[in-house]
């Protein structure tokens, strides 16, 4: 008699190594190894962050490159995720995103461009100059 193995439950994300709590405001450069969770307000640069979580009350004003991201709050800036990017219901993202996998739940407000990466190491240039006129293909 052979038994089938049970399907494994999906892995829970690791606990945050660094947390900016509700009511906290941070401006500047933050160097984080591991997971950063923002439940307060952040404006500046984030370096060496592997996983970024923006909580329901979190606000981030920054361009960021991470391995993966999960957004429940508000983001004003560009996000480049070398792996997965999840936008949960109630999130507000204003900026361009680039990722290998993008999940946008119903109820997300998103404005910007989305670029799907073929490989996590692909170079992607996020154009932040929105004043330049767009070129359109002509027949």
Image (cartoon, rainbow, N blue to C red):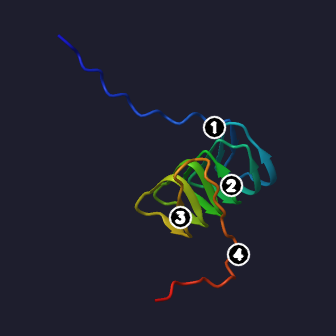
Q: Position of residue 101 (x, y in %)?
A: 48, 51
Sequence-earlier tag: 4 or 1: 1
Of residue 53 and residue 49, the one placed in the foreground of this image is 49
**Nearer the camera: disc 1 or disc 2:** 2
Contact check, label 3 and label 2, Cβ < 8 Å: no
Of residues 44 and 135, the one drawn nearer to the viewer in this rendering: 135
Work out whether residue 23 or residue 88 is closer to the camera in this orientation and state it. Answer: 88
Q: Which mark is residue 64?
A: 2
x then y, percent, for residue 40: 68, 53
Separation (CA) of disc 3 from disc 4:
16 Å
Measured in 3D between alpha carbons, the distance from the residue under mark 3 to the one under mark 1, in whole angstroms, is 27 Å
For the residues labelled 1 and 2, the Cα–Cα distance comes to: 17 Å
Q: CA distance from mark 4 to mark 2?
A: 16 Å
How far across and down, in percent of the image, does residue 128 sit? 69, 70
**Residues under labels 3 and 2: Cα distance?**
15 Å
**Percent position of residue 12, x then y:** 49, 34
Residue on which the image places disc 3: 114
Q: Which residue position is annotated with label 1?
A: 16
């Amino acid at each position: 008699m052979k038994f089938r193995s049970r399907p494994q439950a999906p892995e829970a994300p690791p606990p945050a190594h660094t947390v900016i709590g509700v009511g906290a405001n941070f401006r500047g450069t933050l160097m984080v190894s591991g997971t950063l969770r923002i439940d307060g307000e952040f404006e500046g640069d984030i370096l060496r962050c592997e996983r970024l979580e923006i909580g329901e009350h979190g606000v981030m004003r920054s361009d960021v490159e991470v391995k993966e991201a999960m957004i429940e709050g508000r983001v004003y800036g560009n996000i480049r995720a070398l792996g997965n990017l999840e936008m949960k219901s109630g999130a507000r993202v204003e900026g361009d995103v680039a990722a290998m996998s993008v999940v946008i739940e119903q109820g997300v407000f998103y404005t910007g461009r989305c670029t799907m990466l073929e490989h996590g190491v692909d170079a992607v240039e996020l154009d932040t100059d929105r004043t330049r006129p767009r070129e359109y293909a002509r027949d």
